[in-house]
Image (tube, grey):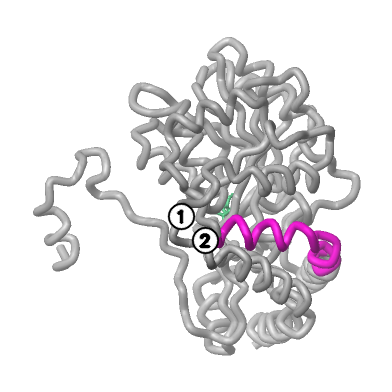
Amino acid sequence: MNEQLENLNRLPLRDDLRGLTPYGAPQLDVPILLNVNENTHGLPEHVRRAIMAEIESVVGGLNRYPDREFTRLRQSLATYLGHGLTADNIWAGNGSNEVLQQILQAFGGPGRTVMSFPPTYSMYPLLASGTGTTYVTGTRAADFSLSADSAAEQIRAQAPNLVFLCTPNNPTGTGMELDVIEAAYEAGEASNAVVVVDEAYAEFSHADNPSALQLLPGRERLIVSRTMSKAFALAGARIGYFAAAPQVSDALRLVRLPYHLSAITQATAVAALTHADSLLSNVEDIKSQRDRIVAELTGLGLKPAPSDSNFVLFGGLENPRAVWEGLLEAGVLVRDVGIDGHLRVTAGTEAETTAFLDRLRELLTA
Ligand code: PMP
């Protein structure tokens, strides 16, 4: 046993946390980071200036606690989302990870279960264990899709307290038809399940893939979670949010820490949302790099999964570890998500994507 683990094991850690491994995407100092699905395009200069100005306007008041209800931010997010939503429908936290954790604190916990469909977002089991919620899994088809019938049948069989549906799904990139979400919601009725649709990558979807936001009216157990980390290029600012019936936010008020969203976070998010249009134009560029990756990988004889997000999972690799290392030697960091014969790459800028594709071609033809 290594020394770090021995030191940890001496502590009176909760029994259910013993032996667990923390979230650990490598943070390496390399020139081309295509491993954690960040927005590779950075913030345009005028958006940076707008954020600085908004932050400057709150700095003088930092001796006071921030608006606990983050009212302006909730209004801005409701306006951005549309679909007839108002501030009462919106909740926000320090990244959608925190929002998902708060959902589990309120609706999960000891004696309760959360169900998801791997391969899916690697934080779900960790958020479950951190909140003492039991994580149960369903299955997908071989092409990583999930049909309405299959989802409904599996949910009925397991009767979970919560269901996490990730669409577009990380790490596969796969989008989910709305009928799957409708079926999952209906199947969850027997166990009164809260159904969370994690749309962290929604803005990168192809135009014909609508958001679950339109399913919200009349469904009080449905929550649609989003983030500003991806399309809005604000991963470092930590802002995630959801849309749901107002009483869902009331449930979260019972578990959130007071003043959990700093005045600086709120200012940053509000300023960025006033420039949603220019930030979303970068999204179009990222989508075209994503589509280029899918086309070129197919040309190389690999098997990229169709993607509605800003990353591509690709199979057909005989030795993914060697390819991962070969890319790293060339300064390109991608992600080994633990699926046999597969790697995942985030769509970069045009130059970054070219560097990735050139190096990959070299490695495969060597
Ligand atoms: N959901 C999914 C599917 C994700 O991939 C991520 C980030 N990788 C998150 C949620 C969390 O993002 P954040 O906490 O930055 O909002």
Residue in the foreground of this view, choosing between 294 and 15: 15
**Of residues 182 and 315, which is closer to you in this image?**
182
Query: Is residue 144 in view?
Result: no
Q: Amino acid at mark 2?
A: Gly
User: Mark 1 — residue?
Assistant: 64
> Is mark 1 in CB contact (under 8 Å) with mark 2?
yes
Residue nearer the viewer, 33 or 358: 33
List the residue tagged with mark 2.
Answer: 61
As for residue 289 lying within the magenta part, the answer is no
Q: Residue furthest top?
A: 190
From the viewer's perspective, is residue 180 above or below residue 335?
above
- The answer to whether the residue bearing label 1 lies less than 8 angstroms from the nearest atom of ligand 1 is no
- The span from disc 1 to disc 2 (Cα, nearest Å) is 6 Å
What segment is highlighted magenta in the picture? 264-283
* Whether residue 190 is visible: yes
Q: Is residue 225 left or right of residue 281?
A: left
Q: Residue at x 74, y 24 (%)?
A: 182
Residue 275: in magenta span: yes
Residue shown at 84%/67% (left/top)? 278
Name the quadrant containing residue 7: bottom left
SS at circle 1: loop
